[in-house]
Image (cartoon, rainbow, N blue to C red):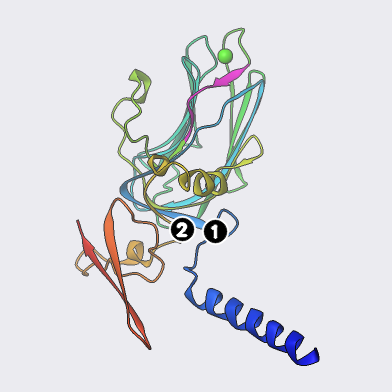
Amino acid sequence: MVRSVDFRTWTLLWTLQILVLFLPPFQGPFAVESASFFGASFLKVPLQDAQSKTDIYLRFRTHRASAFLFLAAGSSDYCLVVLENGEIQVRINLGAGEAVLSSTSGLSLNDLLWHELELHRTDADLTLVIDGIHDTYLDIPGRFFELNVKYGVFIGGVGGFSELFLGNIPNFRGCIDDVLFNGHDILKMAAASSLTDEHNLFSVTWNCSEEFEALSNQPISFVDKAIYDLRTYIHVDMKFSKDTWQPTARGR
Ligand SMILES: [Ca+2]
């Protein structure tokens, strides 16, 4: 009897060990840290929201001076956050037309260092805080206070989503981390939703890629230990043999 229990325990432990050995580094929504975007990447969370308060938090690092960061999109309402010549620009429309709030003049946030963005709104009072110290404010004109989000939240780019207010904004290239929108953990939700709808995630990896550290004259390697979700960007072939396994990758 004792021997039987010992054998079952041993078998269970051995199976768990095998599973842990062969699990890829990311296996679900709870392992998300930061996300890398490569210039055509984006992620989308198809949530709906309607509140007279807006709270956005995210961290980013990039060399790109003008790029898309964040969009919460509705039919006419939106809250768009972009990098514009190294400064942050928030364009918000609660239903009465677009209002624009920029970060403190003279900031150059495209220096590849991590920067922190906070956006707080209660009714018409909008506050933008960069790196915890650079505050700017805006009193949004109009009588509408709800931000009606119908089409979800986009990070890094918008994919096929198209609206006139977007204009022609280059996609983000770099790392984004800790994205919160009204209490929603956007990266975690995107990772989870991409498991059921792969169209919600394009060319995003769950890490901060060393690729962004490379100088322009250095070759870029796509064989990165942390690239595990390039289903539509790079085909990853995994060859298993009896004793070892060897991942190989080839660009499309
Ligand atoms: Ca509204």
Residue at the disc numbered 1: 33
Disc 1 secondary structure class: loop
The x and y percentages for residue 50 are: 62, 21
Q: Measure the alpha-carbon separation of dots 1 and 2.
A: 7 Å
Q: Of the residues under marks 1 and 2, which one precedes in the sequence?
A: 1
Residue 219's disc is none
Look at the picture and state if 237 lies above or below 150.
Answer: below
In which quadrant will I find the C terminus? bottom left
Residue under the image location 46 percent in, 46 percent down: 194
Indicate the amino acid at tag 1.
Answer: Glu
Residue at position x 67%, y 86% from top? 10
Highlighted magenta segment, given as a residue range: 146-153
Q: In the rendering, at what x and y percent does residue 171 appear?
A: 33, 41
Residue tagged by mark 2?
206
Question: Residue furthest toward the bottom?
Answer: 3
Secondary structure state at the residue bearing disc 2: loop
Q: Residue 127 vs residue 231: left or right?
A: right
Q: Inspect the image, locate mark 2, and give the three-letter code of the amino acid beneath it.
A: Trp
| Residue that appears at 65% across and 79% down | 12
Taking depth in this image into account, of 174 and 47 the one nearest to the observer is 47
